[in-house]
Image: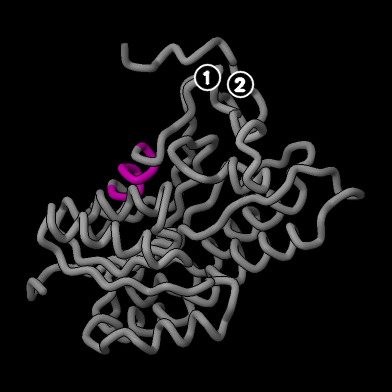
Amino acid sequence: MKKYAKIVFITGATSGIGAACAKEFAKAGYHLIITGRRAERLAAIKDKLVYKYGVSIKTLCFDIQSQKQTEKAWSTLPEKWQNKIHILINNAGGAKGKDPIHKGDLNHWETMINTNIKGLLYITRLVSPGMVKREKGHIINVCSTAGHEVYPNGNVYCATKHAVDALTKGMRLDLHSHGIKVSQVSPAHVEETEFALNRFDGNKEKAKIYTDFNPLTSKDVARTVFFIASQPKHVNIQDVILMGTQQANSTTIHRSGRIYDKK
C-alpha cells in the first residue's frame, strides 16, 4: 500500500454507481475497500483496478441488510485499514416494486428499508468512530431525487430516500464539530446500473425504461461524488441534485428520443 494514499470505503460496489465510483477513485490513486454480495464480481473489479491503476484494494462480501454479516465482515479488515478510512460512500441501496400502497409487497418493503436505511446505519456506525477519533473524514450518502419529492407508486422507496436525506442532515449536525464532512448526491434516473432490473424483479422488458430519453449514467454520478470529495478542507458540498437534461423532476421527462447518444 502507498503509505500516504487515502482509503475510500464504498458499499454496493459490484455494479452501477458503486463500481463507477471505485474506478473514479482508483484512477485518482485512492486505495479502496469495496463491498457487495457477489464475491466473483468484487474479485473481478479488484483485479481490473489493481492492474490498471496500481492501488491496493480490499473486498468484503456480505449482505448489508444483516447487522451480523456487516459486523463480521468489518472485523476481518486489518486495523491499519479500519483506522485510515478517509471517505465513506454509502451507495448500497435500491428500489423494489412499483405498486400503490394498498397492493405493496411486504418483502419489497423490508428489502428497501433494510438496505437503504439500516444498511447505511450499520456501516456508518462502524466507520464513523474512527473518523471522530482522528477528527477528519468525509461521509457521502447516495440519496435520490426521491428523497426530495414523492411520486405515485413510489411510496416506500421515496420514504427510505427521505430517511437518507434526514440522516445525512442529522449526521452533519452530530459530526461537523469533529471536523467531519457529511454530504450526499441525489440523482434522478441513472442508466448503466441494475436499478430498474432490480425494481422489476429481473423482468428485462419492464426494465427498459430509458429507451426514449437520455438519463444520467453511472459515470456522471461517480464524477459528481468525486467532485464533492475533492473540495478543499474548508468546503463541504452538502447536496447535489442532478438529472439528465430531458428530466425536470422524478416524473416529468421529455421522452423525445435518445438525442444525446454519440453518433
Q: In which quarter of the image is residue 219?
A: top left
Q: Can residue 181 be seen in this view?
A: no
- The answer to if 43 sits in the magenta stretch is no
**Direction from residue 226 to residue 69 in the image, left or right:** right
Q: Is mark 1 on a helix, strand or loop?
A: loop
Q: Residues within 10 Å of mark 2 (few under 14, many from 20)?
A: some
Q: In this view, does 97 lie above or below 112?
A: above
Residue at the disc numbered 2: 253
Q: Residues within 10 Å of mark 1 (few under 14, many from 20)?
A: many
Numbered disc total:
2
Which comes before the other along the chain, label 1 or label 2?
A: 1
The dot on residue 156 is: none
**Direction from residue 30 to residue 143 in the image, left or right:** right
Overall secondary structure of the magenta stretch? helix
Quadrant location of the C terminus in the rendered image = top left
Question: How is colour applied across the structure in the image?
Answer: one colour
What residue is at 34 percent from the left and 55 percent from the top?
A: 236
Q: Quadrant of residue 220?
A: top left
Where is residue 124 shown, x and y percent of the image? 47, 74
Residue at the disc numbered 1: 213
Separation of disc 1 and disc 2 at Cα?
8 Å
Q: In this view, does 169 lie above or below 263?
A: below
What residue is at 7 percent from the left and 75 percent from the top?
A: 3
Where is residue 227 shown, x and y percent of the image? 28, 46
Mark 1–mark 2 CB contact (< 8 Å) = yes
Where is residue 134 shown, x and y percent of the image? 27, 82
What residue is at 21 percent from the left and 61 percent from the top?
A: 47
Bounds of the magenta segment: 220-226
What residue is at 55 percent from the left and 10 percent from the top?
A: 256
For badge 2, the amino acid type reads Ile
- The answer to if 225 sits in the magenta stretch is yes
